[in-house]
Image: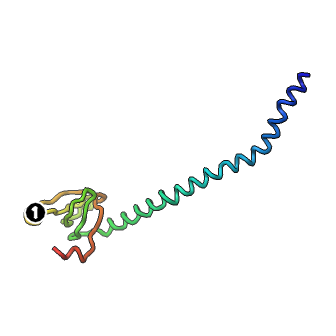
Amino acid sequence: MLYTIIAMATQPAAAGAKSGGAGGLMGMIPFILMILVFWLLIIRPQAKKQKELTAMLSTLKEDDKVITTSGIYGKVFSILPDKDIVVVEIDETNKVRVRFQRGAIATILPRKDNQED
């Protein structure tokens, strides 16, 4: 009698385990799709933007007009290669120059805007 009760109790679990294998894989598909959408919408565009910023900063040279990440407009006075520091002149009349890390440069203004001074 005890054997019959144990056999009946384990039989539905065994039947559920067979169908649960496919259900487990099907249950993971929404999770995999969510990761794929997250990568396509967030990670990939951010990596592309970072690559463009790195390329822009590598073309930085003296006399370029720039905008820093803090919103300061200025002209690149000099670039210190060994320390990765850019000296930006923010006031030509008083010769006010500020040192920034190269990564603090947000935008290099186009040449057309550079010559409007």
Tell me the element at label 1: loop
| x then y, percent, for residue 19 | 78, 45
Q: Work out whether residue 33 or residue 102 is closer to the camera in this orientation and state it.
A: 33
Q: Which residue is depicted at the point 16% across and 63% down?
A: 89
Q: Quadrant of residue 82?
A: bottom left
The residue that appears at 82% across and 36% down in the rendered structure is 12
Residue, far left: 94
* Local crowd size for mark 1, using a 10 Å CA cut-off: few (<14), some (14–19), many (≥20): few
Image position, residue 93 (x, y; %): 8, 65
Query: The disc labelled 1 sits on which kind of residue?
Result: Lys
Relative placement, left or right, of 16 versus 48 is right
Instruction: Tell me where residue 54 sits by quadrant.
Output: bottom left
Query: In which quadrant is the N terminus drawn?
Result: top right
Q: Is residue 5 above or below residue 61?
A: above
Q: How many marks?
A: 1
Q: Is residue 16 above or below residue 116?
A: above
**Residue 37: where, in percent of width, then height?**
55, 57
Name the spot of residue 69 as percent of width and height, x first. Answer: 28, 58
Q: From the viewer's perspective, is residue 15 above or below residue 47?
A: above
Instruction: Give above or below for 111 relative to 81.
Output: below
Question: Which residue is the site of mark 1?
Answer: 95
Instruction: Tell me the residue at 7%/62% (across/down).
Output: 94
